[in-house]
Structure formats: C-alpha cells, structure tokens
Image (cartoon, rainbow, N blue to C red):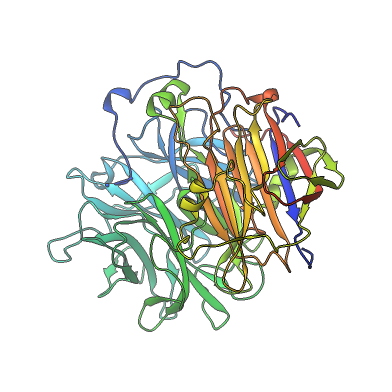
Amino acid sequence: MAISSLCLLLLFSLFLGQGVVELEASHHVYQNLQTSESTSESQPYRTGYHFQPPKNWMNDPNGPMIYKGIYHLFYQYNPKGAVWGNIVWAHSTSTDLINWTPHDAAIYPSQKSDINGCWSGSATILPGGKPAMLYTGIDPNNTQVQNLAVPKNLSDPHLIEWVKSPTNPLMAPTAMNQINVSSFRDPTTAWLGPDKKWRVIIGSKINHKGLAILYTSKNFVKWTQAKHPLHSAEGTGMWECPDFFPVATKGVYGVETSKLGSSIKHVLKVSLDDTKHEYYTIGTYNIFTDKYVPDKGQVDSDSGLRYDYGKFYASKTFFDILTQRRILWGWINESSSVEHDIKKGWSGVQAIPRNIWLDKSGKQLIQWPIVEIEKLRVNQVKLPSKFLKAGSVVEVKDIEASFKIPGFEKAEVLDPSWTDPQLLCSQKGVSVKGALGPFGFLVLSSKSLEEYTAVFFRIFKGHGKYVVLMCSDQSRSSLDADNDKTTYGAFVDVDPVHKSLSLRSLIDHSIVESFGGGGKACITARVYPTLAIDHEAHLYAFNYGTEKINLTNLSAWSLKKAQIS
C-alpha cells in the first residue's frame, strides 16, 4: 500500500502454533557551523507526529511533567544551528502529549554556575504542587555543577518564566569530595524519604566504574553528599541521564516517585556515554541504607535490558498524576551525516511518549505508545486472511493482521553462542532464508524494492523452548551510502506456541518505531530513503522462510499531522 503523506501507523498481531497464538555530554562542538542555515527546500524526512522543533539541534528531553492540567516538555536545544552547542532548555506545552505549543527558552546561561551551558536535569513537584528544576550547569572553568530553578509565577499554567536560585550551584565537585569535574551531570527527579529528606542522584564515574552519586536535603536548597552512591557498576563507564523510579508489582498504573512499600519495585536506568546505549535493572531500594540492589538475574551492564534496542538515548520518565501513568520520553538522534544535518537545517527528534509498567513476570518493563496517538488515526484499512507462501512478498493494501504458523518442527536450532541479538540480526538479515522466518514487513519501500526497511521475526528452537528474535534491518533503507545503516535486534521474551506474538510499528517519514511482543521489545530506526518518499513509499508483508505462514487480521491507519510548531 502506498503510504500517504499523513504517515502510517501499522498494528498487527501474530498468532503462532497451538495457542492463541567521551555524548561527554555527548558532543562535538562545530564552532564554524553554529549559525548555518538550511539550504534544502524539500524536507522529506521531517516528521508528521513525532516532536521536533522547527529547526536546529535538539537532544535530551528534560524535566517532563504535568502542571495544572498542562503537559510540559523541556529539551536540550541549540538556538543557533543544527549541531550541538550553545545549549539552552527549550520549552513546549501540550494538553494531550501529541500537539504542542512552543514557548521561549525557559532556562538559559545567565549565572556564573551555568554560563557555559544549561545541560540536562529533571523536574520535581514539591509539597503544595510547586515545580522545581534541578539541572547541570557548566561554569567558567567548564566544571559540571548542579543548579536549581523554579517558576516565577505559579498561577501561570504554562510556566513561561523561571527564576534561578541565588545560591547556585547547590552541588559541585570539590577537592574534598574528589568528584570528577567533567563527569558529574544530569540530576534525577528527587524523591522524599520517610525521614522527610529529599534524595536525588547524579550520574558520574570513577575510572571505568559508573555510579549514581546520592545527595540528601531537608529544604531542597542545601544538599549533602551521602557517604556512598545509591548504586555503581564496574566496567560501565560514565552514567549519563540516570533515572530512578518505583513501579507497582501488579497492574499497569504508574506510581508517584516517592512511593514505597511491599508492592513496589524500583527501576534504575542509566545512559552509557561510552557505548551510547541505555540499560535498566529492576530491583529493591533499601530505605534504611539508601542503597539499590538489582534483583537476581538482572544484568547490570551494557548487555542488560534496554528500553529500546535501536536509536533511543537520554531517556526520562515522569509520573502523570492526571492519568496515573508513568510516561517515558527518549531522544532519537540522526543516522545521517553532519553535512546532511546542516543542509536540512535540523537534527534530532523525540520518540512518541510511551506508557511503561512492570511485566507480570516482574523481570522487565512493558512499553506501549500513549493512547493519545490514536486521536490522529484516519482511514482504517483491513486485510482478510491470506497465506504467505515461502519466499512470497505481498503488498499490503487493506491492513489488520496476525501470523499463524502451522508447526514448529522445522525451526532452526539456536546455537548457544548466539547471545548477541544485534549481531545475530546482522548475520541473519532479511535476505538470509530460514525455516520460521524471516517474516514481517518491508516499510518505507520503493515500488521495485530498491529501498526498504525490514522489520521482522525469526523463531529458533532453543534449549527446551522456542526463542523469538526481532530485527530491524536498515541495510537497504536508502541508496544514499552516506548514512548509518546499522541493523538492530532484540530477543523477545514470548512463548510463540502458547501466546500471541505481536508487532506494532509507527512509521513517520524517517522514523520506524517498532514494538514487539506487546511492548516487551522495542526498536527505533532512522532511515532516509531517496526513492520511497511520500506517495512513492510502500508497505509489504513478506515471508522469506521455507515454511508457509498465514497472515490475518492486519489493521492500519493513516495518521493526521500533529500540531507541533
């Protein structure tokens, strides 16, 4: 089906088998490019419903929150160009997390403690409903220090003006604390303990050990460093943009950041400066020792659980008190060259906000696009049941789907050495035939398949169970060789014999944001086709495996353009 210029949301479910079935703050400064303007009139890669400013560089989401019924998103922004530098906190507001109104920059260099940049931070809602922002500033010596800003007018639901504390910086490296002056950034949302003290963590490192430095305060202004970090992990390097929050052990609702109790687990997420990946663990927070311990079986390293196995970094959550959700934001950076970014005049978008909660297993989080995105849906189409024969490609014209596999007997045996899903997807890309897979969809495809991005599954026979591999293969996404076409992959913790295996993709010009297994695995890709643009972009269902697959109940919608700028 030719994808309309309104963009496309693809949602399909698979039923298989017997059951229903050094960013050192990340960034190279291009001094000679800071005021470059776009020379490109055509903008085929700008998004239709993912958040991005009208022009220039954007990276980390900062201080997301809801105040007086209005959602706020602050973000790292360069007002002078499409590359990193001159960083301020840009600000937009929304009533639905989809359509956004821009405002003037909320926080920008104006004090000695942030004169060289206002870097990432988080919002905390103080007693009485007063928001407060803790953020990293760069002082005249390029030391990273922590600052406080609060709204000037609490009666303004849009919080246009912010005032900085005259006592900034509140937390700083010193000769006594021996904190690394260039690795001390990105304070989290603070939480209030039973002792009525606030706690906050800041990302740092000692040699190659990543750590979350813990501070406490009685009044949110005077902060004292704890004797030990909340948590640390050898071999992980600098921890950027840490996030620490509670999740309920039952149900899909979020909980307030200071929530404690026997029905609560905690999540610690860190963004790794060395690899530009994120990982998270689920564990227990001891309120008496102020220490966090990951649960047994949790992998406390770069090979652990991720929110997203593709382009997704510097993420930040907040608790939406209006809907009782915990909502996740994340930065999707570009896969194009700096020269291309300069030409098009912008760089960076935000992922669609995701609702997150603890899986019933207690071993991982589930993520799903916020329901508000469905307001943009138009022109639903459906496809009746159809068999995908071995080696077949079918252009999807009316969409609502499921895949059913007659049997698993011929599933390829999973080699015990195949432990890296991204490497496995690279070695077994869409062109490598197996028995049960690859099968899935070719999105943003040109008519003759010179270009396409493949999102697909393979099923292997593991030790005592079947193993599901989800891949996003960008190797043929564009005829332009000057792009990063990395293939991404993730194992999906789903039993394909007894449980449905679902896949949902949000397709938005240069973004393919996919959710496998009901949100157990997520992969986001950036692609820049030269042929598969606007009405020349097609979407196909395919099965390149040797076994026949039944495709049923596929649903798709066009999406209206969101009001963002």
Q: Residue at x 32, y 24 (%)?
A: 33
Q: Residue at x 74, y 54 (%)?
A: 13
| Depicted 187 relative to depicted 266: above or below | above
- Kindly give the residue lying farthest to the right in the view shown: 384
| Depicted 402 relative to depicted 176: above or below | above
- Kindly give the residue lying farthest to the left in the view shown: 175
Task: For the N terminus, give its image quadrant.
Answer: top right
Q: Residue at x 78, y 52 (%)?
A: 402
Query: Is 23 or 161 nearer to us in this picture?
Result: 23
Residue 155 screen position, x and y as percent: 55, 50
40 sits to left or right of 559: left
Task: For the C terminus, give its image quadrant.
Answer: top right
Question: Can residue 550 be seen here?
Answer: yes
Across the whole image, how many numbered discs are drawn on residues?
Answer: 0
Query: Is 381 or 424 nearer to us in this picture?
Result: 424
Residue 266 screen position, x and y as percent: 49, 72
| Depicted 289 relative to depicted 447: above or below | below
Question: Can residue 156 be seen here?
Answer: no
Residue 264 screen position, x and y as percent: 55, 77
Q: Residue at x 49, y 47 (%)?
A: 427
Q: Quadrant of residue 533?
A: top right
Residue 137 screen position, x and y as percent: 29, 48
415 sits to left or right of 99: left
Query: Is 379 or 525 nearer to us in this picture?
Result: 525
